[in-house]
Image (cartoon, rainbow, N blue to C red):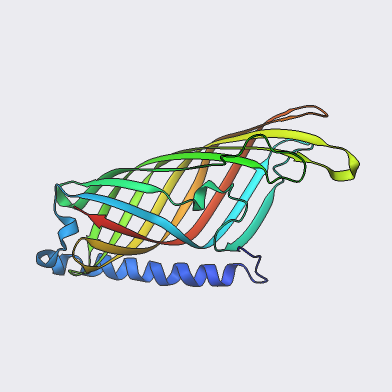
């Protein structure tokens, strides 16, 4: 369960500082270990990953540019763990497929998705939620030694999140449905540990920087909403991967 911290930036900055130090050490020593490259760095291999399997901490800021009432209130928060609302596409586990190119460059794609299987919700039921994300990227594997590397990646991502529910505040029953769409620029840096052949564990940081977003909502009472929207997130995650 995520919770708001009293001093939100201190643990986040400390975690990022440790990871940045690891990336710097990797960059400084990777040339000295050219001959000790792990198997994952070999051209022609495929990497199957879940780099955001375990969300650790995140800073998130969202906003919708409208003065009309809606169900996507602006928020700025520092959070720990997974989002219990299941509407945050950034910390949903995403399945990645990457191909290792010559000189340890990588080219890949990640996909994420989740959907409620229930029918239309009634008053008192949890909202029906669906989300989808696709994120192509390029990367580079900087090798420290046979068991440790840094995986730096950058790319773009498209997300679409929808929710449908019924509110009963103030004695009035109001049904609603909304859709959030966003195009992001993405940057990531993961420390990769390979203690066993063909198996790796990752710990890394990511940034989701909004380029364009929109929010649309329809309500059974009152006007609908169509507005520009954006969500920015910086986070720390852990994951696993295998290479073939």
Which residue is nearer to you in this view: 198 or 90? 198
Give the x, y percent position of residue 152.
32, 55
When the figure is inspected, residue 95 is found, relative to residue 242, above or below; the finding is: above
State the image quarter where residue 138 is shown: top left
109 horizontally vs 243: left or right: right
To which quarter of the image does residue 195 belong? bottom left
Report x, y in % for residue 162: 60, 36
Residue 81, position as x, y percentages in the image: 55, 63
Is there any visible trace of residue 68 in the rendered image? no
Of all residues shown, which one is farthest toward the left? 35
Q: In the depicted view, which residue is nearer to us: 166 or 185?
A: 166
Using the image as rendered, state which of residue 92 and residue 143 is in the foreground. 92
Residue 113 in sight from this viewpoint: yes
Residue 88 on image: x %, y %: 56, 49
Residue sitting at 37 percent across and 48 percent down?
95
Tell me the quadrant of the picture where the N terminus can be found: bottom right
Q: What number of labels is visible? A: 0
In the image, residue 99 sits, relative to residue 59, either above or below, namely above
Determine the residue positioned at 17% across, 69% down.
146
Asked whether, in this view, residue 228 is left or right of residue 82, the answer is right
Q: Going by the picture, which residue comes out furthest to the front? A: 118
In the image, residue 81 sits, relative to residue 137, either above or below, namely below
Q: What residue sits 14% from the left and 68% below the top?
A: 33
- Residue visible at 63% across and 35% down in the picture: 119
């Amino acid at each position: 369960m995520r919770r708001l911290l009293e001093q939100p930036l201190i643990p986040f900055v400390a975690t990022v500082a440790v990871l940045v130090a690891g990336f710097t050490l990797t960059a400084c020593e990777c040339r000295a270990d050219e001959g000790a490259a792990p198997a994952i760095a070999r051209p022609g291999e495929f990497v199957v990953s879940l780099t955001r399997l375990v969300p650790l901490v995140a800073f998130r800021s969202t906003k919708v540019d409208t003065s009309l009432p809606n169900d996507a209130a602006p928020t700025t928060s520092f959070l720990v763990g997974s989002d219990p609302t299941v509407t945050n596409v950034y910390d949903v586990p995403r399945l990645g497929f990457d191909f290792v190119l010559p000189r340890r460059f990588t080219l890949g794609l990640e996909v994420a998705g989740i959907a409620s299987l229930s029918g239309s919700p009634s008053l008192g039921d949890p909202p029906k939620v669906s989300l989808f994300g696709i994120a192509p990227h390029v990367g580079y594997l900087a090798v420290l030694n046979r068991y440790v590397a840094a995986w730096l990646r950058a790319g773009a991502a498209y997300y679409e999140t929808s929710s449908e529910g019924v509110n009963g505040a103030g004695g009035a029953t109001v049904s609603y449905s909304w859709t959030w769409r966003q195009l992001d620029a993405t940057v990531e840096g993961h420390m990769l540990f390979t203690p066993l052949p063909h198996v790796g564990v990752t710990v890394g940081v990511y940034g989701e920087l909004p380029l364009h977003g929109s929010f649309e909502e329809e309500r059974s009472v009152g006007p609908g909403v169509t507005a520009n929207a954006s969500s920015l997130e910086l986070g720390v995650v852990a994951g696993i991967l295998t290479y073939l």
